[in-house]
Image (cartoon, rainbow, N blue to C red):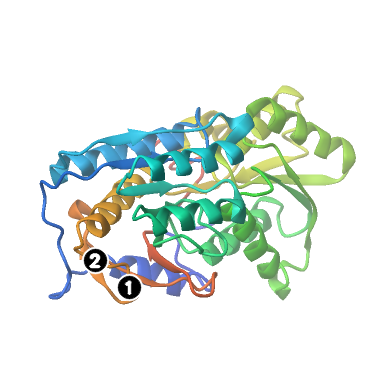
Amino acid sequence: MLNVKTIVKAGVVAALASAMMAGVAYADAMMAKPGAAINTVFLPKFSGNIVFDQAHQGAEEAAKELGNTGKLTYEAPPPTDSVAGQIEMITNATTQKQAVIMLSNNAGDQVAPAAEAAQKAGTKVVTWDSPIPSGKGESVFVAQVDFGSIGVVMADMALDTMGGSGEFAVLSATPDAANQNAWIAAMKETLKGDKYKGIKLVDVVYGDDQSEKSYNAALALVDKHKDLKLIMSPTTVGIVAAAKAMTDEKLCDKTKVSGLGLPSDMVTYTKAGCAPEFALWSFVDLGYLTYQTAYALATGAIKGDVGEEFKAGRMGTFKIEEDPGRKGAKRILMGPFTVYNKDNVDKP
């Protein structure tokens, strides 16, 4: 089993050390002056996902703490039209002269022209959860954890859950989700190591972060791959749908489930042994840090340059750095995350 608290192991030590350094105060760290009137838009991938509601909760907490007298608008396209919906909402926010758009991108680089137009018009774009792959039109990306480390943890959970050997498949969100694509790519790279020679990734499918579609995709995987020992789902919707599908069909003894999920959603499946372990971070904190970043940019406390440090309320001091996964792009690394199993899944 992986360490169930904060994950520290070969391949992720550097990323987590960087995240831990975020809480260290620096003498030259900037602090945004509270009380400004900044109008912002909080734009997740789509509506109806509890983790995005949690992130919005964190953003609202930060807005209140900063005493922003402007408006924080929450907008989310429907899951069935998220790509076009996000592009349209960015365009509308630009026309409305919003100060900052906080975007969890679900449109890949298709969103870049709208983001670039927003930046040109004076509306800053701060991405969170899922960046713009090219970085075009983006001021900075607020990363939940280092994307490379997620790939390592997913590979390790697969190795642990399958006992060191067997076939597994990935049930992801959407084909254009930059975060899931980066995590899967990092996992594939990790799997090249000799440590993982006994396990094999045989398929990657998409459930579009819709419960019914993900449920059916999970069943299709076990029908297609008769020796499948694990479904790895790096999405909170997909992991629940896959666990429910395996439970309903009484397949948990044959095919386990792992990935990224909410403890409140997964507690039953984890206690029953269908999803022995999974991982996640705090979306409330992610929304809080994103808003703190957006406000600091909009008020001029920071410019968004590599090397700048700023104080983000209760979460401490953070530094803008080059994004190692996207040449020319910038990120702020939040971290860390937790692996859950039967011993801690129901702990506060």
Quarter the N terminus occupies? bottom right
Indicate whether 95 appears above or below 323.
above
Which residue is disc 2 drawn over?
Answer: 302
The amino acid type of the residue labelled 2 equals Ile
Q: Residue at x 32, y 73 (%)?
A: 305
Residue 214, by quadrant, is: top right
* Depth order, front residue of 239/131: 131
Q: Quadrant of residue 187?
A: bottom right
Whether tag 2 and tag 1 are in contact, CB under 8 A, the answer is yes
Q: Assign a secondary structure to mark 2.
A: loop
Depth order, front residue of 251/223: 223
Left or right: residue 50 versus residue 304 is right
The residue under the point 47% across, 60% down is: 137
Give the amino acid at mark 1.
Asp
Left or right side of 331 for 134: right
For label 1, the residue is 305
Q: Position of residue 244 (x, y in %)?
A: 66, 27
Coordinates of residue 43 in the picture (x, y in percent): 43, 40
